[in-house]
Image (spheres, rainbow, N blue to C red):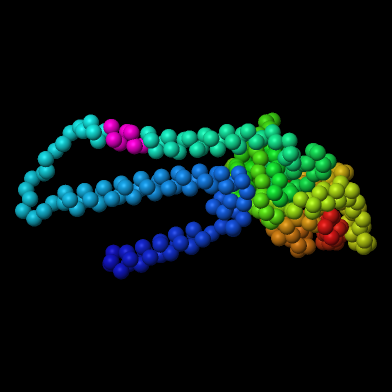
Amino acid sequence: MKSWQTWRQLFLFALLTLVLSGCGIQELSTLRPQGPVAEMQFDLMKLSFSIMIGVFVVVMLIFTYVLIRYRKRPGQEGIPKQVEGSHTLEILWTVIPFLLLIVLAVPTVTTGFTLHKEYDNKEALQVKVIAHQFWWEFEYPDLGVATAQDLVIPAGKRVQFDVTSADVMHAFWIPALGGKIDTNPGLDNKIWLQADKPGIYYGKCAELCGASHALMDFKVEALPADEFDAWAKKMKAVQAAPATATAQQGQEIFKKSCLGCHAVAGEGGKLGPNLTNYADRMRVAGILENNPENLAKWLKDPQQVKPGNNMPNLNLSDDQVNALVEYMSTLSVKK
Ligand code: CUA
């Protein structure tokens, strides 16, 4: 291969690395912690990363020195003097990694205990997280409300999560706030998190759980404390009242075909996401922008949007889909 081709390839690889490292959403990054848990975890990352860089630099310096100092010089014959065994060196390269591991272990274990101690903070808001293939259910036992896909929390307040799964293993992860933790069927795992500022944070399922694992996203909406209280109150008192005739028709269809699995305002099944505040959500099925076209697309063929999910294709006519879309756009506690 000509040398300019090699250089061109190297350049392309370097460019690709740069472009790929720019990927990712700010609110989905562990490198921009937005709460105390994420900050503690980020501190640990910085510590281990600094140690890694230190080790790399020292090893490379010694390596370069040896390369130059002991290179073959013109006129040199035979192989250099062979050395075997050096107690000094062996002790040195056992003790140094040992010390480095201690420096890593102490803060890691301490942080683990600090986070654990806070599990039973009585001031914290309690949220029960139930993972499903491929969506998230959030219950607020103390407030008597439930939602799905968009987790609403108060900013600046601890939230204590009891996480479990309704089917297979998933993992609950909000990179900017901290985590992650496995959700196992039949087991309650605990984690607490806090968002310091109001905002939208992105959550992910972090355990391979089936065909649509990669599409098992959710959002976290951190509201100022008073807005959160108002939200919870409205969620509890909500009564969907369809305004137009089409919406009314949609409600009929919903009652007949959807309510068995999807609850609205305290009524209905729990097999699918609770839709009480569906119209306030940012996404349809957690992944598509929430607009009428995408909802229609989802209702017409859920498998096409999220392969392997449990929502059946109801074979709805266009008119039925339109009516349902109109009805579902009334399911809001904000509008
Ligand atoms: Cu649920 Cu991956």
Residue 233 position (above or below residue 282): above
Residue 10 on image: x %, y %: 36, 63
Residue at the spot 38% in from the left edge and 35% down from the top edge = 99
Apparent side of residue 79 relative to residue 209 in the rendered image (left or right): left
Q: Quadrant of the C terminus?
A: bottom right
Considering the whole magenta stretch, tell me its main secondary structure.
helix
Q: Magenta region: which residues?
A: 91-97
Question: Which of the two residues, 235 or 95, is positioned nearer the viewer here?
Answer: 95
Residue 37 falls in image quadrant: top right
Residue 151 position (above or below residue 123): below
Residue at the spot 31% in from the left edge and 47% down from the top edge = 58
- Count of numbered badges drawn on the protein: 0
94 is within the stretch colored magenta: yes
Residue 63 position (above or below residue 92): below
Residue 149 seen from this side: no
Residue 101 on image: x %, y %: 41, 36
Residue at the spot 72% in from the left edge and 40% down from the top edge = 124
Residue 3 on image: x %, y %: 28, 66
Residue 266 falls in image quadrant: top right
239 is within the stretch colored magenta: no
Q: Quadrant of the N terminus?
A: bottom left
Apparent side of residue 72 relative to residue 106 in the rendered image (left or right): left
Residue 112 position (above or below residue 201): above
Apparent side of residue 39 relative to residue 164 in the rendered image (left or right): left
Residue at the spot 88% in from the left edge and 50% down from the top edge = 238
Residue 139 on image: x %, y %: 77, 41
